[in-house]
Every structure is written in C-alpha cells, then in structure tokens.
Image (tube, rainbow, N blue to C red):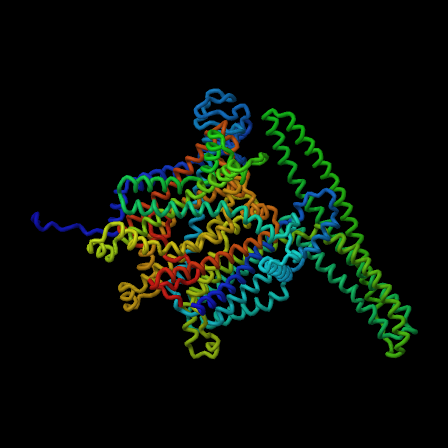
Amino acid sequence: MVSYIVRRLIQMGLTLVIISVLSFLIVALAPGDPFASQLDPKAKPSDIERQRDQMGYDDPVVQKYIKFYGQFFSDFGAIVSQDSAHEWRLRSARTKENVLPTMWTKMLITLPLVILTTIITWTLSFPVGIGSALRRGQVPDRVATILSYALISFPGFWLAILVIKFVNGTMGIPVVSPYTLGVELQGARSFMDSTWHVAVPAVIGSFGGVAVLSRYVKGQMLEVMDQDYIRTAKAKGLDADTVYYRHALRNASLPFITMLAGLLPSLFGGSVVFEAIYAWPGLGRWVFEAVLAKDLFIVITSLFVGSALTLVGILISDILYSVADPRVKLA
Amino acid sequence: MSNGTQVRKPTSPLRDALRLFMRNKPAVFALVMIVLLAVAAASGQMFVGKAPTEDQLKLIEKAEVTGDTLDLDVNPSAVADHTRTELKDTFLPPFSESRATPGKIYYLGTDDLGRDVLARLWNGSSISLTIGFLAVGISVLLGITLGGIAGFFGRSRVRLPLLAMLLAAAAGGILWAAELEAAAYPLLIVAGGCFVVQLVMALMGKRFKSAIAFGVVMLLFVGVQFYNRGVESGTPEGRTFQHASLVADQSYELVRAIRDLGSAVKLIEDGDPAAISDEARRAAQLDIEHRQAAIDLLLAENALVVHEAQLEIVERGIPEREQRIEHLKSLSLPEDVKVEEDVLEGDKKRLEGLKAKTAELQKALEAARAKHDEAVKLTAAEVKLQGSNDLMERRADLRNKVVSKFRAERDNRFETLVKGKLLNGETRYGAYRLLRHFLTAVLLYLLLVVTSLLVAADSQAAAGESKNPLSKLFIPTINVDDLVMRFTEIMLTIPVLFLILMVLALFERDVYIVMAVIGLTSWMGTTRFVRAEILSLREQDFIQAARALGVSDFRIIWRHLVPNAISPVLVSATIGVAGAVLAESTLSFLGIGAGPDQDTWGKILSDGRLFLQDATWLTWIPGIAILITVLSFNLLGEGLREAFNPKAARPVNCFIGGQAPRCLSPFRCRVAR
C-alpha cells in the first residue's frame, strides 16, 4: 500500500511537471497584455515599462517559467506553514493583489455553494436512481426518465434565469449574490436571507447532476440485480429490503467511488456560469475575469492548482475503492 | 414447402437493430425532428441571408441583361433577412404585422433591434448544427485514431530512434516556438537525424508504404512552416512585426558591439599609442559613427514600416465607414450619421497626415542609407592599423581615457535609441507569431505522433531484427499503449473549462474556433472506450482465427474491428452532438462564443435574456429550439444504444441509461475486473 502510494505520488509529480510546462506555454505564449487593461490615466509609458521589468514580463519564457514556479512554491510554503511574516511574491499584473491569498478567500466564498450543490446532487440521485430501478417501467420510473431527459437537455443558464425571475419577481425573495446587499439584517432574518441565497443556486445547479447521476445509479442497480447472487439471496428467503439495500446497493455503489475523484476539483472551480448568473464573487468568476484580462499569473496558478487537485482526487478515490472493495488489489 | 417446415428468414444484425429502433417511438420521433432540423439548416443558407436593397436589385437585374458578374454580399432569393434591422418594428410579439412594411407578418416576433426572430433562428440553425457535428467529428476522429492505435498496436514497443525523434521534436518545437532558436536547433537536428535513420531502415527493409507515409508527414511539417512564414509576411501586421523584430535583433547586435568596444580598444592596445594614437582615435571614432549610422538606418526602416502598416489599416477602414454611414442614413438616424461622419473626417485627416509622414520617412530613410554607405566605405578604408607591442603603462593610461569616454557615449545611446524607441510598443507583435508557431507545432506534432506510431507497428520491429549495423540503435523502449494513454491522462487532468476559456479569449470571437476547441478537448473519453473495446475484441476467437489465417492487420481492422466497435462510437457521437450544442450556447452566454455577425441559437437566447420581463418570446423561442434539438439527439442516441445493444450489457460513455463508467481514473486502472 505504502509503496503503491509512493509510486503514484512520483507518477503524479511527473504528470504535474508536464502539465505545468504545457499550461505555462499556452498561457505565456498567448498574445495580449495585462498591462494594456490598466486604466490609470496618470500612468506614464515609462511607469508601465518599469512594472513590466519588475514583474519580468518581457523575460524569455524559460526564465519566466522558473521565476513563476519559484514564487508560487515560496508562497505556497508560506500558506502551508502559516508564516504570517511572509512577503507574498506572486502578484497579479492587473490588480496587484497577492494571487494565492486571494485565491483562498475566493475559494471560501465559492465553497458553501459547491458543497450544498454536491450534497443535494448525491442525496437526491441515489433514491431516485434506486427507485426507478426497482420500479422499472412503472409510472415513477417513466416520470424520472422524462424529467432527467428534460433536465439534461435544458440550457442550464436559461433555467437559472427563469428561476431567478420566478423567485425574485413572483415570490419577491432576492436571490442574486451571496446575501442581500445594502440591507442590515439581524438573527434569524439574516440566516434565512443567506439560506435563500445559497439554496436557490445550489438546487438549480444540482439539477443537471441529479439527472445524470440518477441514471447511472439506475443502470448500475439494474446490472447488479441481474446477477446470480441476488437470485440466491432472494431464493434464501431474505426480505426484499435486505436484498436490495444490503446486497445489491452495496455492490452497485462501488463505481461511484471513482466519481468522487471529480469532487475535489469541482470544490475548487465551482461553476463559472452559475457564479456569473447569481453574481457570486467566487473563484470561477475571478478566474474567468482574469482570463479575459489576460492576467497571466492568476490563470496559470489556477490551471496548476486545478490539475493538482484533480490528481489528488483521483489518488484518494483509487485508495478508497480498494478499501471499499476487498477484491481490488492496488499494485 | 409445407407449413410445418417454415424456414426462418436469415436476419442480419443491422436489420435486427433497425427493427428494434423502429419500435422505440421516442427515438423515431427524435430522428424525424433531426431530419427536419437538418432540412431547415440546409435551406437556411438558401432562403435566409442579406436580402438585396432596391438599388442592389436594380444592379442584379442589369447584370442579368448584360451578363456581368456582380460581387455583392447578398442573397437574391432570400425570403427572410436576418441582418435587417427595422427600428419601427422593435419588440413585436409573435404573429404581429410589421409597422414598417405593411402586410409582412413576423411569425416569431422581433427583437430589440427589430430583427425577425424567425429569420435569425433559421439562419442560426445551420451554424448551431454545423458546430455540433464538426466538433463531434473532430473529437471522434481523434478519439478513434488514438484509441485504435493504443488498443490494436498497444503491445508493440516504441523503438529508441522513434522515441528520441518524438521527444526531441516536442522539446525542440516548444523551444523554437519560444524563440530560443539556439537551443532548439540541436534538438531539431537530432529529430531529423532519427527520422533519416528510420527512413533508411524502412527503405532497406522494403517497407515502402511506411516510408512514404513518414516522408509525407515530414514534408507537411516543413511545408506548413514555410507556408506560415509566407502568410506572416503577407499581412501588414506581419510585415511590421518581421521588420521590427529584424531591426530589434540587428540593433541589439550593434549595441552589443558598441558595448564591447572590441575593435576600437583592441586597435589602441595593439598599436603603439605614441605613434598612432591619433589614428587609433580616428579609427575608433569612425567605428562608432559607422554603428551610429547603422542604428539610424534601422530605426528609419522600422518607423517607415510601422507607418505604412497604419496607413494601410486606416485606408481600409474608410470605405467600411462610408458604407455604415449609408446604412445609417437609410435608417434615418441623423445623430448617428453625424457622429460617424465626424469620425470619418478624422480618419481622412489622419490618412493625409500618415501619407505626409510616410513620404517624410521615406526621405529620411534614403538619407540614413546614404550616410550608412558612406560610413561603411570610410571605415573600410581607415581600419588598417598595426603596431609594435610594448609600453604597457602609457597604453593602459590611454585605454582608460578612451574607454571611459566611449562607455559614456554607449550608455547614452543605448538608453535613448534602443530602449526608448524600439522597445516601446513597436516590437510587440511577437506574441501573435509565437502563438501561431505554437499551435501549428502542436497540430503537426499530433499528426507526426499518429503516423509514426502506426509505422512503429510495421517497420520498427522489422528494423530492430534485421542484420544491419544500424539496427543496434533500434532498442525497444516503452509500449505504444503507455505512450498514448499517458498523453490522454494528462489531457484529462487539465481543467478543460479553463483551457477552453483561455484559448477562446486569445482569438477573435468566432464560432468555428469554439467548435475546434470543443472538439480538441473532448476526445479523451472516446479514446479510452475505443481502446477498451478493441482490447476486448482482439482477444476474441474470430479475430484470432483471422490472424491464424494470415489476414493482414489492416484488413482485420477494416473487416472485423471497425464494424464491431462502431456502434458505441456512433451512440456517443450522437449524444456528443447534443453536448456540443449545449456547450456552445453556454459559451455564447458567457460572451465568448459566437462572433458579432454569427447568429447561433445560444447567442439569440443570451441576447434575449435582457428582456426577460417584457419580451418573453425572445428567450422562450430560442430556448425551446435548443431544448428540442438537444432532446432529439439525446433520445436518438439512447434509441441507437438500445437498438445496437438490446441487453444494454456494455457500458457506453453516454450519460443516460447506461452504466456508470467503471473507472474514471486517468491512471491506468489496475482494478480487478
């Protein structure tokens, strides 16, 4: 086990190095200029020139690469060791903010939304999927099937806008942005306000996920219930619930452990579209704006961190799989 | 034949599938919808477009009589015009009559600019569907090719020259794209050497097909690079950049020369300062003047090129603006016309100024050239000094004086001339060239990888086993399978949305680039399941039998593997079209999808969302159009899956109905099956 993890970590390191080179090249060789979007009328060309020199923006690519990752890991080390005296080195070219601390704060804004979306998705899909597998071809199954087709085919942003129109316009509850702006609320009212602001985007955001995941659960359950050991269990005279939930579901849910791999990067990235519609100043929107302004360092940092989190998520899910399924040997 | 021994008609798998499909009513309905959509999309090009104005109609009539050819950007048979804005008709609900042209009915209403929603939708249908199909086409093609190679040739080993060639070409290409040419050339030479070795071995082993395939790809590689350079020098920006970078390079060299003061100081050092110090000074002075003249010449060239490019851009913009003024006049918008006319006036003045300036610069260039020529002659004549080799102290003294004076002059010149003028803006066209180099390099590199991996199965092993002394080089290294799947894993790990955003932010808004990017970032799933499919097929008895009969690899692939592996690909492609249409609409919503003159459905929908309260039809109509399209493709895909695979035993990478993918891990799954 330990040797497996060590080997995987080395592999992951190599993959990360390649990804870092590729993403750096795509971003760094791209045309465009973050300094061009500075709208300070007082800035003289010589000032901008000095900033460029300071950031090393015109350096050769290799030098830029080494410098960037040097700064990144020095800042990253400071975050890990909670070094408060650390002088942040990685800065945005456009807004001069420190990239990694800002990324952390933006992530904290996105986190509630993503966590709630994930919880709703996973807790809804399993009952729906199991239900339609057990009542295959009956009314509930058909309703679930039609609904999931409709939800998968609906343009998500349009649905979100329609829901805003309904909740905000018809019901009179403000839902855009993390909390109602410009109003001082106390106690329970404040709590309800935040709850509405998180719940509506989370529910809308989880629709697509529920539609997809519940179909997977259904397919998986159907496959497992065709197996011989289920027939044996039924023949033994076990009651239906024991057969379905103890024998069938436990085996059917194994593949979903691998799907957990996708959760970690999604916690990081959130959803650019939903953050744009619901005006959440979260990580997705921050990166999106940085991309549009060609803010080199923010974009590369987020590409790199996103890839690293994906790799870590995969490692964790593989280990979990081997824990959950004793037949699987990690080699 | 009696009733009892009725012979059952033999059925083909295809006919069975068709029968199953026809029973699935939603899927048949979806197929009908898709055919209707396709007809609408195809007829959109015929009936929807810029309708000709009355003047243009007269021109067309005249041309029909005289037989002239007209170059008008209009469609004479257009029954609906998606570009026509009629401000009197803004926000008309569906089925209302036009106020501008009585008798005309807007069946789906008009938008905020008075455009006919039906015409926009009709025109957009062709773009949206084309995007869906082409994006999926790219991803399926890449997926099948790479997956097929990994599955079928996976066990053959990549020999050392091939691996070295691929790695050296990748590293060299990246360095070259980063303009580190000095480091890139050795690597590219290594790659070329490996290529030649392989070509020679393939020819000696009489593997002519491989040799030809290999050679053709290499020729493409080199040819496209040259084409790229040709294109670059064709546009004004490209030319400006080429000259500017040339100027910058040469000026840097000169500045470096001034900085060293190599020749000037050496002259004094080597000569006898007492005897020839005046001459040495004069020679050094001449040397500096020479360099100064060269810098001046280059700067003059640079300035001229930049101004010529600006001139061309302004000149090209004027007729466009005049057209726009005509258009605004026809809409009777006097304020807008006035604004545009002011701008036009300004542009014309600027054009005059630029022309004068260009002429001036032309003269300055000629003067600088003359001065430079003269300086060259003078230096050539004067630098002929030799002397004895003694009197250390006096020499050092003199050298210090001369050097300090020269250094001050050089610093001054470096600051004011080179850093001040050259680096400020005018050389920054470089980035565009870098990106283009990078993208072509990536594309061609992929082609090279695919061809050489195909060749690897054929000629590499043969080369390794031949008795030729060169064959000692052909050491087996890693599996083809490992190579391809590692690449797939890396692509899977990069967050795709950020990548798409990044690439799209770099280009002009163009929906066909969106298509290419969606296609290029979504092939990994297809690769993985095509590989799995082929791995399981190639172990089956009928393949083994074919192999035992001595059937060739390519015949096995075409006759046995492709027909058996094609159905899941077809299913996932159908569902992929739905995904691509949705992805395009989402990107259009974020404002990075369609270009300004492209009406995709996603764009119409996101245009309409501003008027959600007042003009509901502007969002509901395109929204429902997208919904129906995506739903139809999803249902069709599901129907196909059930028809090809009645028991739904094999998972397909679709998200509806099928099973969950067994293994999402980008690393090779070591999970026991």
- From the image, which quarter does the C terminus of chain B lie in? bottom left
- In the rendered image of this protein, does residue A199 appear above or below residue B100? below
Q: Name which quarter of the figure residue B178 lies in.
A: bottom right
Is B193 left, or right, of B354 in this rendering? left
Is B454 left, or right, of B638 in this rendering? right
Where residue B75 appears, x then y in whole percent? 49, 34
Q: Which residue is drawn at 42% across and 58% down?
A: A317
Q: Residue at x 38, y 62 (%)?
A: A322
Nearest the eye: A100 or B614: A100
Where residue B536 appears, x then y in whole percent? 32, 62
Q: Is residue B177 visible?
A: no
Q: Is residue A294 visible?
A: yes
Q: How many marks?
A: 0
Nearest the eye: B638 or B209: B638
Q: Which residue is drawn at 63% across and 30% down?
A: B325
Nearest the eye: B300 or B643: B643
Where residue B413 appears, x then y in whole percent? 81, 57
Most distant residue in the right direction: B274
- In the rendered image of this protein, does residue B333 appear above or below residue A32? above
Is A219 left, or right, of B597 in this rendering? left
Q: Name which quarter of the figure residue A42 lies in.
A: top right
Where residue B639 appears, x then y in whole percent? 31, 45
Q: Name which quarter of the figure residue A145 lies in.
A: top left
